[in-house]
Image (tube, rainbow, N blue to C red):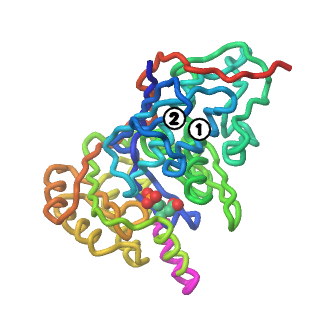
Amino acid sequence: MNIEASAPGKCILFGEHAVVFGQPAVAVALEQRIHVSIQPIEAEEWTLEGNKFNPRKHPHLSTLRKLLWPTKDGAPALSIEIHGNIPRASGLGSSAALSVAASAALRAARGRWVIESEQGPVWTEGYSSEIEDTDAYTGLNSGIRTTMYHKKELHLFGNDALDLDECSIIGHAVEAAAQGGRASPMDASTCAHGGVILLSEQIESDNEYLYQRQLDMDDGKRTWELHELGVPKGGEEVYLVIGNTGVHAPTADQVAKVSKAIQDEPERMKEIETIGLIARRGIEALKNGDYEAVGRAMTENHVMLRGLGVSCHELDDLVRAAAPSSLGAKLTGAGGGGCMVALTRNPDITSEAIKTAGGKALVSKFGNEGMRLETPHCEPFWSPQIHPD
Ligand code: PMV
């Protein structure tokens, strides 16, 4: 008896760094995925890949346990197996994919209590952007919200118990907890919903709008509006080739570098605004299926990021190597190392060029599925007690 869920990695097509200052950014779900499989065991302690689970080494899983699998309420110990092909710690969303997939597996493993209403089943427990004071962020020590109705009528199983909004809200909360309270919701939402996700300070278009996310950070509250752009027109004709430099550069250092540059020379905010303009142009081109223009915007975005000081010679080498065979190329994510991405109609030639220049290459198409329950008809291992009124 096991329950398995998976979620894709992501890469940023436009707008990294500028998004921290409120400009729009676009992330794309990749073909590469992480799978999380869980199984109840008769033991005191959880195991991870056969070894004793160490919460300090795995902060994401440890926070998820608090949110969805409270041992104090009798949830049984679990054995967890993780496999997949998203390189770790290289800006491709491996930790968000892990969090989203594990949250889906745990939700399926407990099912969801609902009550019937004329509009269909209404949750009696869970996290949602519809619940104003959803406590995924604040309730990390208090366990899951079960106060909406205090009734249990119907227990939903398998896919019926799952909800993408919930997986992404939990994924975001878990990432924020693991990163000292600072995380944008871009990774968790892209890994949960798949496809192409647009994040902005304002609602860009009503029909693509998903939800708002807010997070209290030490320097104030952040608000993001998230949108789902769907599979871009003609997206099956082009490929993303990711080039990994293998150089490790923590995101926080890169973000601090940009923040200092703007503080020292406030007029450089113009560069951030220019990235926003380029991103908007790229988004329009993407919606129109004009991949030549998408590629041009990506390359311009790279030039701006270079100017901001977040590229490095390894990234520039891979971008240069990919250029002749691609429509455009840029660093993706925080920079300083990590990965670049090229948009191309010739994935084999672009991959070879990246490898020759010293990078590791991954190929992905557009339009990849988000979180998926690999055992869609599974039955819960455990169900929380909800005290009657
Ligand atoms: O390196 P990644 O994939 O975690 O991306 C960081 C993106 C930044 O814009 C640099 C930071 C952020 O929080 O959005």
Q: Nearer the viewer, mark 2 or mark 1?
A: 2
Check residue 156 for magenta coloring.
no
> Which sits earlier in the primary sequence, circle 2 or circle 1?
2
Residue shown at 58% from the left, 47% from the top: 174
Residue type at tag 2: Trp
Q: Give the mark count.
A: 2
The residue segment tinted magenta is: 261-277
| x and y, in percent, of residue 70 in the image | 65, 33
Residue shown at 46% from the left, 54% from the top: 26
Q: Which residue is mark 2?
A: 46
Q: Label 2 to label 1, Cα distance in Å?
A: 10 Å
Decide if residue 215 is on the left or right side of residue 168: right
Figure quadrant of the N terminus: top left
Q: Is residue 356 visible?
A: yes
Disc on res. 65 = 1
Residue type at tag 1: Arg
Q: Compare residues 247 and 340 and report the one nearer the observer.
A: 247
Decide if residue 384 is on the left or right side of residue 353: right
